[in-house]
Image (spheres, rainbow, N blue to C red):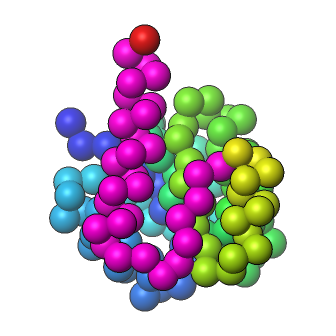
Amino acid sequence: MSQIVLLAEDDPIIRRFIITSLEREDFIVFPANSGAEALEVCRNIVKVDLLLTDVRMGDGLNGVELAERIMKERPGTKVLVMSGFPETRIEAAEKQLPFLGKPFTSALLIERVRSILKVAAIGAAK
């Protein structure tokens, strides 16, 4: 069964790259161009296996805040935050959120997503 990824990314080129990369690997992707839109999408779909979010988005709700809200509303949802700003790695680490630095390749993206979802699956099996 395909796993569902909620993608919050405000850059349309990066968003399209991520969607294409994940869909090629049979993930179902629900894209959003802001944190607020991602929160709304999350509330309207049945299941989210992974939130993949940019840390810095222009609408006021950043990716770390979005992750905290979604994890509170949907416990068990896995999160991967990404950013091209190295200092955001510290913010993610303080919240114990997995981080993916931009730029990244499609192969690295898929490896990180699968790794996080595999850990989730192992934890659920115990």
Which residue is at the front of the view, 89 or 12? 89
In the rendered image, which quarter contains the N terminus?
A: top left
Which quadrant holds residue 126? top left
Which residue is at the front of the view, 13 or 124? 124
In the image, residue 14 sits, relative to residue 43, either above or below, namely: below
Q: Give the left or right position of residue 41, taking residue 97 as reference.
A: left
Residue at position x 48%, y 62% in the image: 7
Q: Position of residue 86 (x, y in %)?
A: 69, 76
Residue 117 visible? The answer is yes
Is residue 110 shown in magenta? yes
Is residue 114 shown in magenta? yes
Which quadrant holds residue 119? top left
Q: Give the left or right position of residue 98, taking residue 66 as reference.
A: left
Which quadrant holds residue 35? bottom right
Assign the magenta stretch its main secondary structure.
helix
Which residue is at the front of the view, 56 or 119? 119
Magenta segment range? 97-125
Q: Position of residue 28 (x, y in %)?
A: 30, 53
Residue at position x 54%, y 54% in the image: 80
Q: Give the left or right position of residue 69, taking residue 8 as reference.
A: right
Residue at position x 44%, y 32% in the image: 120
